[in-house]
Image: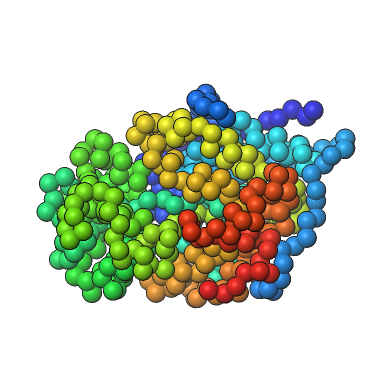
Amino acid sequence: MTRRRTRRRLLTGIGLLLVFSLVAAACGDEETAETTQAPATTQAPATTQAPATTQAPATTQAPATTQAPVTTEAPLTPLTLRLGRFPAGAGAAFLTQFMINEDLVEEAGLEFGYDLDVEWLNMANAVATAQSLLSGDLDIGPMGSAAYIALVVEEQPVTPIAVAEGHFKFLIAVRGDSDIRNPQDLVGRKVGTIFGTGLVDALAAMLEPIFGTADAEEIGIELVNVSGIAPLATVAEGMDASIVTVPSWLSAREDLGVTAIYNSYGYTEDHYEGPLGSGAGILIPEAENSPFWPDGFVSHRAITVARDGIIEDHPGAVAAYLLATQRAIEDLQMRTPANVASLSSADWRLLPHVAAPIVSEELLLLRGWAWLTEGEAEVMLLQGDILLAAGSLSGPVTWDAMMASMAKGGGVAKMAYDAAGGVPGADVFADVTVDRRGPPAWETGSWTAP
């Protein structure tokens, strides 16, 4: 059997968390840094318990499978596969670190007839991922929803192939002694954010159902633009509150006593006091009026995107990446959240037990799979409307364009899905009571416009 190999290089400094594009984590567009090659910095933790640009017809089925897993002895095709990751993301961080540690992409490549030499590259943000894909310096990489939607609008030659991470939590943070106790108390106050990022969009989505408008100025809230994540997490001087993502908030809460009033899931946090009562865990009724419900006020999705050329030339290598992703998810589901968090706790700068909620709330582990569905297309369409209203897109994104984009990756996704044993079944895809989902990308012929 051909030797498995992975090039690993020294990780340069990355900040606390790259907030989204939608922000993200997953894919933070707020910070800029050089793209570096990622090392496997830690061994996988010991197990603690048992163990998809050209437009395609909007209504066509996903492309037919063009390459099946190799079942007979044949010469392997050597290929260097360049994969991007966000070390300070959520699921996009710990999932890829586990794939690095265990050589899962290389192993899956053998099943599709490839001897893969995998280069893992740390991406600074979604813009860096997009630029690297378009230049041909990267084959597959994650990005937040805003960056992906912009590529769809601009008809760029890239294809979404999977969910990179999801269900990331945003919070409205305040200092521990703050007299801001509920959303209405934000009126007349200064709220910190980072202009030009998904944080602004997430804040708008958290305000609109409660106040009837997403325009902070109309509500009477002054937005304060800050230069990085740390001032937001600490609710620094010059702001009364801020919108933050969960890893940076957990760190600030642990070290500085920062607290929060409510979150993007639609529930109150510890510092809440108001007409609903006091304390954390109370459903804010207006959240159910959000277009993103049942995800909450916000549906976070970061998307794994491949350049069209790699899919056209080496569909089996892309399918191998997806198969490795599925196997990683299934393995990590069997571990405790703290055990999984230890994979990325150094990048998050959090102790594993403190970072455990990031793992337990991750969409990929809650679902048990990363396949793109009709629900992801619906979420992207809704977020596109928000981005267009905010002046962040060069034009509108249509349902036909979004559906056609996702259909392009349906063929390679189906290859990986079949190789993974057909998990999950049709009944699981159809269960929309937990989150937005529906038929997968290889069944776009059954998708209906929202």
Q: Is residue 182 visible?
A: no
List x then y, in percent, for residue 11. 48, 34
List x then y, in percent, for residue 290. 38, 67
Q: Residue at x 46, y 49 (%)?
A: 26
Q: Residue at x 59, y 39 (%)?
A: 330
Count of numbered circles in the view:
0
Q: Is residue 250 visible?
A: yes
- Horizontally, residue 225 falls left or right of residue 420, namely left
Question: In the displayed structure, would residue 163 be above or below residue 53?
Answer: above
Q: Residue at x 78, y 29 (%)?
A: 2
Question: In the displayed structure, would residue 214 be above or below residue 9?
Answer: below
List x then y, in percent, for residue 188. 15, 66
List x then y, in percent, for residue 28. 43, 51
Q: Nearer the viewer, residue 235 or 258?
A: 258
- Horizontally, residue 133 falls left or right of residue 395, namely right
Question: In the displayed structure, would residue 221 be above or below residue 178?
Answer: below
Question: In the displayed structure, would residue 400 be above or below residue 284?
Answer: below
Q: Residue at x 18, y 55 (%)?
A: 277
Quadrant placement of the N terminus: top right
**Chosen colour scheme:** rainbow
Q: Nearer the viewer, residue 294 or 44?
A: 294
